[in-house]
Image (tube, coloured by chain):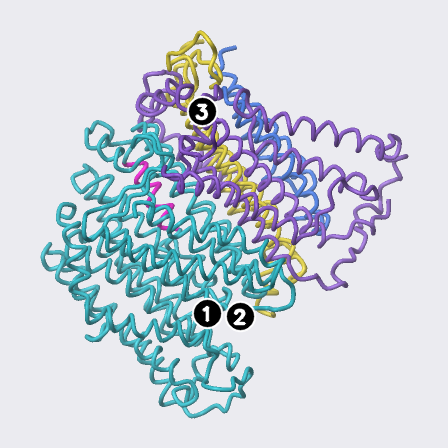
């Protein structure tokens, strides 16, 4: 115990010395720091003209640096594939039965657990519909207010998690096996990459929404491009989170709990 | 309450929670503290003026806590 | 109040962020349980995100969503750092997912998640 | 033609994304799509290299915005060579993985190839991207795929993968902090733009802290001497098919990034650069000695190669530390050659384990009779690692030595010679075990009807042998392509 405290004190002293002697980073609040001058003020002034999406973060995320978001969805997809590959084979049956922990032995039985009083089956269906409604709002609202592909995908995955974790006996809204979920994650990433390839075939650079081959007037193309990107990201992130959930749940049995 | 002082207080809260995580024995307590950590981090992002990042951190904090708890089901709670 | 605030602006917040980073790394190194190492890793990634966001702050600036009247760039927080940090958060979720999958397999194969037992059983395997 | 830099990276990505969906239709459809995309990206990287050689570096801006406002891929002579090398190694390793295929359930088949394709796409992107944060995301993709490939290598691989996960994430966070400080001080993320602002001066302390963080982060990723803890255990237990890709190529890409940062972003005239290079020189010197000494006592062939790859990483850093254009060209040649040498030797280790199930050096008796192709690759790889003239290893060390003499850093010359001799000790031991050892009559686990190994393993091995000798004979044209780029940069 003492050894850890001494370790932390050493870190404090070391960092304190570094920060006292060096003064290399600009003060936090001032708006004349070089970080705001060169690139980000161009984004603020030209975002409405270039991408006509008032939410600057979505403009930078999906349009100016759209390639980063494609790679980000690929990171999520590769995490999903890695988890599926690592947990792919069925675990030996002997390992899946958990011996009840001795921790619970000593404790007196603490009355009816909370989730038994509220009728959880009714509650879950209610909550799920609200979450999905909110997720659709966040997805479509990505350009105006805070929101976008990731949050929407994660929210839909949360609706699925609520169903699987809280009320496993109700049939969930959409039944996912592991292979379908990973394939859906791949399709999400491909929708994103396909939008980029589409712009490339139509003559622009990769992910240049001005060149999308749809017959819509030019300055409406950017929101359409961003919307296609957001749906691709939402599908990718949702499917990956559900894949990881299924893969981990398969390895752990829940019905052996005693209480 | 100027924002910078509020940020400093929230950062101190984060540091205290990290200490709690490091020095604790029971894994379930550690994971619940980690959930509190991700909540306070989300609150810090709002104070710093980043709603998008706060939204994502909230959702992903919930999901990673759920993953930790499912894995904890397989691993016994006692740890050195 | 402004004296403390000036100190915080110049060095205080950065010191706390780097301290959180080194605490996360300290947690990874000293904690014997693999699960606590994963949590330490997450804490370290959150500290990197806090560092980026504190760079993007401006005094008296609103959130980076365009309002009608306001057009000059000093009125909004820096949107670039926010866009980058969305990527960092998603990366941290991916790494945690893979780490937990590894943890489950290690628990099955080696029977425990403590570092000493794993090293002891590793030679046997 | 001008879309090639993007397509080289996007095609393996799309292949990986689609492979699992296509595997649901037919078990080998996903795999063939990935082979198609890797082959297409390799041909495009060759055409891109020809275009770069003929008419100067290619730039590709994503989203079509002006330069500092969008992400940019920048392929110059050095980048083109590295990208085509990574694409070739990726294609060969994908073929090599056919032998390790598990035909049981569809996820395993489709997933294995999509992880390899993601791994190759990540490395292609890291080598060709010119945007600091973009490199971080590509590094994360490469790292995640590497964790999975190491974890697939059996029980001990899980532990090695978990340890590498922790160390890799610490390194990636250090790199992110370094990029954060650079962004705070210069305001842009584009490397070209960043170097222009840094050369305006006035920011030396912040750049020094950022440089130290970058070196720490990328040093851990590339197993430079003081940070190499994760590497030996990772390389010995990784998945048999893609061991060559991880040990051969993934360890080298961060060194290439460090080279681009030190020479193109910070430049040699940066105030503290001398001290930084001296510290790096100390790391490199100890690294060369340490790797060779540790490798001598090994009996497990993969562990021997893992420790020898610590010395190889120090050779590339040696070129960077010396700084003379010739030394830089020599370290790049070593970079390219070693990918095939190290990859080839890991192919042999995988092949012997596939056929006889053992990689203990002592029972390599009479391998040259039973497995002629593998034996030739082991011999040519070992000769090239030591540095015998016809192979590429000799010429790269020769150029590094000339560079060391030019800049008067004789200590590195002496270190280079000593470590080459140490290399000679354990590689000759390997060769001696292959030829002189008496036959251990190991029974053949997987008998193949014709020849020693399935074709999917023989093709990568023959290509590796060919490249080792081709690079040896034709290294002068390669150096002439790369040298003008280093002229303006080196000392």
Calculate the distance from the C-alpha at mark 1 to the C-alpha at mark 3. 50 Å
Calculate the distance from the C-alpha at mark 3 to the C-alpha at mark 2. 52 Å
Residue D200 included in the magenta stretch of the image: no
Which residue does the numbered mark 1 point to in the structure image?
Answer: D96
Secondary structure mostly seen in magenta is: helix
**Left or right of D39 in this view: A179:** right
* Disc 1 + disc 3, Cβ < 8 Å: no
Quadrant position of residue C108 = bottom right
Q: Position of residue A186 (x, y in %)?
A: 56, 48
Which residue does the numbered mark 3 point to in the structure image?
Answer: A217
Q: Position of residue A197 (x, y in %)?
A: 44, 43
Residue D212 included in the magenta stretch of the image: yes
Which residue range is magenta in the image? D208-220
Say what secondary structure mark 2 lies in: loop
The answer to whether residue D178 is seen in the rendering is: no
Whether residue C17 is situated above or below residue A145 in the rendered picture = below
């Amino acid at each position: 115990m003492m050894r850890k405290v001494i370790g932390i004190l050493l870190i404090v002293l070391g960092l304190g010395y570094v920060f006292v002697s060096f003064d290399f980073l600009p003060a936090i609040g001032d708006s004349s720091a070089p970080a705001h001058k060169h690139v980000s003020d161009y984004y603020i002034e030209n975002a409405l003209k270039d991408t006509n999406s008032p939410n600057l973060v979505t403009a930078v995320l999906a349009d100016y640096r759209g390639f980063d978001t494609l790679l980000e969805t690929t990171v999520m997809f590769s995490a999903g594939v890695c988890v599926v590959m690592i947990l792919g084979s069925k675990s030996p049956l002997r390992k899946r039965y958990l011996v009840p922990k001795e921790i619970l032995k000593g404790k007196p039985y603490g009355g009816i657990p909370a989730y038994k009083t509220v009728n959880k089956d009714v509650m879950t269906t209610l909550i799920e519909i609200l979450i999905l409604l909110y997720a659709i709002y966040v997805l479509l609202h990505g350009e105006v207010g805070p929101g976008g592909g990731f949050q929407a995908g994660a929210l839909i995955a949360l609706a699925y998690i609520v169903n699987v974790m809280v009320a496993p006996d109700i049939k969930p809204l959409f039944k996912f096996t592991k292979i379908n979920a990973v394939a859906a994650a791949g399709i999400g990433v491909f929708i994103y990459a396909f939008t980029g390839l589409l712009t490339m075939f139509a003559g622009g650079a990769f992910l240049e929404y001005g060149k999308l081959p749809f017959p819509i007037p030019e300055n409406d193309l950017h929101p359409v491009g961003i919307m296609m990107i957001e749906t691709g990201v939402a599908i990718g992130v949702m499917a990956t989170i559900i894949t990881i959930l299924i893969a981990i749940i398969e390895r752990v049995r829940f019905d052996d709990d005693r209480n | 309450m100027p924002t910078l002082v509020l940020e400093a207080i929230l950062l101190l809260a984060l540091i205290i929670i990290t200490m709690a995580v490091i020095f604790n024995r029971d894994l379930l307590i550690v994971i619940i503290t980690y959930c509190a950590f991700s909540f306070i981090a989300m609150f810090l992002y709002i104070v710093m003026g980043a709603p998008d990042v706060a939204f994502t951190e909230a959702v992903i904090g919930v999901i990673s806590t759920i993953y930790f708890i499912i894995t904890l089901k397989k691993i016994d709670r006692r740890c050195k | 109040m402004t004296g403390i605030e000036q100190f915080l602006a110049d060095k205080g917040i950065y010191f706390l962020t780097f301290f959180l980073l080194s605490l996360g790394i300290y947690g990874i190194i000293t904690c014997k349980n693999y699960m606590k190492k994963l949590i330490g890793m997450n804490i370290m990634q959150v500290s990197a995100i806090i560092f980026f966001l504190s760079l993007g702050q401006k005094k008296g600036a609103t959130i980076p969503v365009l309002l009608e009247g306001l057009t000059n760039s000093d009125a909004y927080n820096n949107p670039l750092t926010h866009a980058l940090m969305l990527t960092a958060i998603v990366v941290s979720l991916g790494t945690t997912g893979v780490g937990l999958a590894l943890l489950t397999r290690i628990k099955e194969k080696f029977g425990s998640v403590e570092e000493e037992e794993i090293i002891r059983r590793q030679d046997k395997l | 033609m001008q879309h090639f830099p993007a397509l080289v990276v996007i095609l393996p990505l799309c292949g990986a994304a689609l492979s699992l969906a296509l595997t649901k239709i037919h078990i080998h459809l996903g795999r063939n799509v990935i082979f198609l995309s890797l082959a297409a990206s390799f041909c495009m990287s060759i055409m891109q290299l020809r275009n770069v050689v003929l008419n100067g570096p290619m730039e590709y801006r994503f989203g079509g915005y002006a330069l500092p406002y969008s992400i940019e891929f920048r392929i110059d002579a050095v980048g083109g060579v590295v990208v085509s090398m990574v694409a070739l190694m990726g294609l060969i390793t994908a073929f090599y993985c056919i032998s390790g295929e598990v035909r049981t359930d569809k996820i395993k088949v489709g997933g294995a190839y999509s992880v390899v394709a993601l791994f190759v796409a990540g490395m292609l992107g890291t080598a060709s991207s010119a945007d600091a944060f973009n490199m971080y995301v590509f590094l994360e993709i490469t790292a995640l795929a590497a964790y999975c490939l190491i974890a697939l290598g059996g029980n001990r691989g899980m532990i090695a993968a978990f340890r590498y996960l922790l160390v890799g994430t610490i390194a990636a966070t250090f790199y992110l902090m370094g990029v954060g400080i650079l962004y705070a001080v210069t305001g842009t993320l584009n490397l070209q733009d960043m170097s222009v602002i840094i050369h305006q001066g006035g920011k030396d302390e912040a750049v020094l802290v950022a440089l130290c963080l970058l070196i720490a982060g990328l040093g851990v990723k590339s197993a430079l001497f003081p940070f190499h803890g994760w590497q030996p255990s990772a390389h010995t237990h990784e998945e048999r098919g893609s061991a060559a890709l991880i040990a051969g190529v993934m360890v080298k890409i961060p060194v290439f990034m460090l080279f681009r940062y030190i020479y193109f972003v910070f430049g040699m005239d940066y105030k503290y650069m001398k001290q930084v290079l001296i510290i790096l020189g100390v790391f490199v010197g100890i690294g060369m000695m340490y790797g060779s000494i540790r490798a001598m006592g090994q009996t497990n062939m993969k562990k021997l190669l893992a420790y020898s790859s610590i010395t190889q990483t120090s050779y590339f850093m040696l070129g960077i530390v010396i700084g003379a254009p010739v030394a830089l060209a020599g370290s790049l040649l070593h970079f390219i050659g070693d990918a095939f040498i190290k990859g080839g030797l890991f192919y042999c280790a995988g092949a012997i384990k596939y056929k006889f199930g053992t990689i203990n050096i002592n029972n390599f008796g009479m391998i040259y009779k039973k497995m002629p192709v593998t034996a030739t690759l082991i011999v040519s790889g070992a000769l090239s690692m030591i540095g015998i003239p016809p192979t590429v290893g000799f010429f790269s060390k020769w150029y590094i030595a000339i560079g060391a003499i030019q800049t008067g850093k004789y200590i590195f010359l002496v270190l280079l010679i000593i470590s080459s001799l140490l290399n000679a000790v354990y590689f000759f031991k390997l060769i001696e075990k292959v030829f002189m050892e008496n036959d251990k009559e190991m029974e053949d686990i997987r008998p193949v009807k014709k020849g020693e190994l399935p074709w999917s393993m023989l093709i990568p091995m023959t290509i590796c042998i060919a490249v080792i000798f081709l690079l040896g004979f034709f290294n002068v044209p390669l150096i002439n392509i790369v040298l003008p780029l280093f002229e303006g940069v080196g000392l």
